Image (spheres, rainbow, N blue to C red):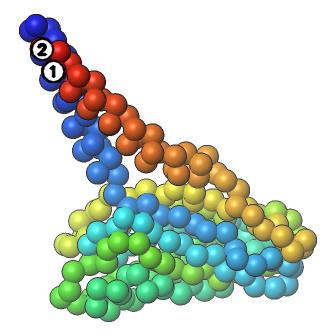
Amino acid sequence: MRSVRTICYLVLGLTLLVTATALAAGAVVTLNPPAAAATVGSEFTTDVTIKGSEAVLGFQFDVVYDANLVELTSFDLGPWLGASGRSPAKLGPAFAKDGGRVTVGAYTLGQQAGAGGDGLMVTLHWKTKANGAVDLELQKLQLAGAGGTALPGEISAGKVNVTLGNASSASSGSSASPAGSLQPLLLGGGILLLALVAFLLLRRR
């Protein structure tokens, strides 16, 4: 009987650990594919969205691309960062000297709480330069809270592939994309299964 009780405690402890890990994952940031076709000599936009955020006062991330095919001309802040009433301001864009990488970000001023929930972070404006297929990818995500504290966050579906010259574009479905959409369901199912096993073992006592 003692061994059964020990197993139950181990299962319940593992359940709590998995739950705490899931809660600590923080916000999820996604790079969305263009809504319209991109042709050479034209411009297109890509939106960066966020889900599950809490008390965010500022953010920053890098965008990596092929500078021979496209260039980032500007970016606009979405309504999410200033939705709490704070005043947002842009940081950048800061371009790498060797090209192909740009850092964009924003901060806020005010006494209100930081941004939370889901929303549009930024809209990136691109200009096409030549025919080809280009990967656009987000890297080095940073979310800041009160006092500059780093907040948990991750990039999911952070890459899109855009075909230039053929008026077609599509998401690349990077390795994080399909797994990112299934991960919450699998994690939730695993937690429920662990809890059920512990409950049945305790009842058998």
Q: Nearer the viewer, residue 200 or 122?
A: 200
The answer to the question of whether label 1 and label 2 lie on touching residues, with beta carbons closer than 8 A, is: yes
Q: Residue at x 57, y 57 (%)?
A: 157
156 sits to left or right of 128 = left
Amino acid found under the numbered disc labelled 1:
Leu
Q: How far across and how far down the image is residue 165, in percent?
A: 89, 73
Q: Residues within 10 Å of mark 1 (few under 14, many from 20)?
A: some
Which residue lies at the image location 26% right of the left edge and 78% below the top edge?
A: 114
Q: Amino acid at mark 2?
A: Arg
Say which residue appears at 28% left-offset and 24% top-offset: 197
* Residue at horizontal 49 percent and vertical 58 percent from the top: 155
Taking 101 as reference, is 119 left or right?
A: left
Residue 118: where, in percent of width, then height?
41, 72
Q: Badge 2: few (under 14), some or many (20 or more) residues near its Cα, within 10 Å?
A: few
Which structural element holds mark 2? loop
Is residue 141 visible to us here? no
Please determine whether, in this image, residue 50 is positioned above or below residue 44.
Answer: above
> Mark 2 sits on what residue?
205
